[in-house]
């Protein structure tokens, strides 16, 4: 399998620059997810890899070959689109086989390849049907089959699950992950859904405004976001963030926000930072309703309980600042109705610069240059 290398990739439409010098190395067999809000440049980047968009500046390599001027059909990539792009008048078998027929592959080889791919994707019973007779998940599997049958060096997925309902999205995520494990093909996947990114990726590339904010494994990004944007984008629900002022406590710096005092990690830049404005970040999962050692107890007012089965989201507030706590229900929520404080260990707190949004004292792993 081939890797993908992007060096200084820029995309301009006339005078408007929408992708600003992206550098990204994707290893052979790796599953990388580009994630970010609408308009961040992730689909444009994917289309430049595919050859569907011209690269304004920089170099794109697939394996050892520079492909900037190589036609899409000659790049040995296969793309799965959001809208399936199936031929409605052709059967499932003919849709899967279409690319092979265009390449004048021998009929016997086509038949065996289609049969193999249909078996992998659970489509054997549907080969004679047309797309209109299939469910959304089955249509998406046909689109994936058409890509797989070519045995490409790289798979490209452009928000392939966006048109599916929640249950089907969950099923298809598992199928895509299983498929990648079985085939081991280098894959680049675009989505705006951070849950998809977290569940599918070997590494996640978080993008904003045509730039890469951070690259890392799902848990690296979850535990060590480099700025407030990544902290707020990765995680469901997102990290709680609120303004605070640094004061000196008995055992080190503390953050003061709406009367609450929260012990901060031992960060060098905060040792003599009395009065400095910061942003405190605490994930809902790290705010405990049970006492913890070596941390702070923060009083809150409980507004409502959002029940999710085995878990519940407690919507509280620190003064006038909203704060979400994720708690286990234990089968009912009666014991949660009296929550009036949360507890947080010092090592679970993130501190960000108030003006730049950059993390203070955290890991620099995966920071975009």
Image: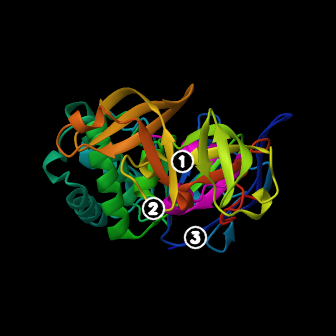
Residue visible at 56% across and 58% down in the picture: 346
Taking the magenta stretch, the answer to whether it contains residue 83 is: no
> Which one is in front, 281 or 59?
281
Q: Earlier in the sequence, mark 2 or mark 1?
A: 1
Neighbourhood count class around disc 1 (C-alpha, 10 Å): few under 14, some 14–19, many 20 upward: many
* Residue 279, percent from left and from top: 68, 43
Whichever of labels 3 and 1 marks the residue nearer the N terminus, that label is 3
Residue 159 vs residue 40, the one in the foreground:
40
Q: What residue do we see at 70% from left, 49% from top?
A: 352
Q: Which residue is mark 2?
A: 293
Local crowd size for mark 2, using a 10 Å CA cut-off: few (<14), some (14–19), many (≥20): few
Quadrant of res 183: bottom left
Q: Mark 3 highlights which residue?
A: 3
Among the 4 quarters of the image, the one containing residue 18: top right
Q: CA distance from mark 2 to mark 1?
A: 16 Å
- Judge by depth and name the residue closer to the eye, 92 or 120: 120
Closest to the camera, between mark 3 and mark 1, is 1
The residue that mark 1 highlights is 282
Residue sitting at 16 percent across and 53 percent down? Answer: 124
Q: Residue at x 71, y 40 (%)?
A: 209
Can see residue 239? yes
């Amino acid at each position: 399998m081939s890797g993908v290398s992007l060096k200084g990739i820029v995309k301009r439409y006339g005078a408007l620059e929408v992708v600003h010098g992206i550098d990204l190395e994707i290893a052979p067999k790796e599953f990388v997810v580009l994630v970010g809000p609408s308009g961040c440049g992730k689909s444009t980047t994917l289309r430049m890899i595919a050859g569907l968009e011209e690269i304004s500046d920089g170099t794109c390599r697939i394996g050892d070959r520079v492909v900037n001027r190589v036609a899409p059909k000659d790049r040995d990539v296969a793309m799965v689109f959001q809208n399936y792009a199936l031929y409605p008048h052709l059967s499932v078998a003919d849709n899967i086989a279409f690319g092979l027929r265009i390449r004048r592959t021998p009929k016997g080889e086509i038949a065996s390849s289609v049969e193999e791919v249909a078996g992998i994707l659970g489509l054997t019973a549907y080969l004679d049907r047309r797309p209109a007779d299939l469910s959304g998940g089955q249509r998406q599997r046909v689109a994936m089959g058409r890509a797989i049958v070519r045995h490409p060096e790289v798979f490209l997925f452009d928000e392939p699950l966006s048109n599916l309902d929640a249950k089907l999205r969950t099923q298809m995520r598992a199928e895509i992950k299983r498929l990648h494990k079985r085939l081991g093909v280098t894959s680049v996947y675009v989505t705006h859904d951070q849950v998809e990114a977290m569940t599918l990726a070997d590494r996640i590339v978080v993008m904003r405004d045509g730039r890469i904010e951070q690259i890392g494994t799902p848990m690296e990004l979850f535990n060590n976001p480099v700025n407030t944007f990544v902290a707020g984008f990765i995680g469901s629900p997102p990290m709680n963030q609120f303004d605070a002022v640094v004061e000196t406590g008995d055992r080190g710096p503390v953050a003061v926000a709406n009367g609450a005092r929260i012990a901060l990690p031992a960060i060098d830049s905060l040792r003599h930072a009395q009065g400095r404005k910061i942003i405190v970040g605490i994930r809902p999962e790290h705010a405990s309703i049970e006492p913890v050692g070596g941390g702070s107890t923060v009083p809150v007012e409980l507004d409502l309980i959002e029940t999710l089965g085995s878990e519940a989201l407690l919507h509280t507030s620190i003064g006038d600042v909203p704060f979400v706590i994720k708690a286990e229900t234990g089968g009912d929520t009666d014991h949660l109705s009296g929550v009036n404080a949360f507890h947080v260990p010092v090592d679970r707190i993130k501190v960000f610069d108030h003006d730049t949004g950059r993390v203070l004292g955290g890991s620099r792993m995966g920071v975009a240059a």
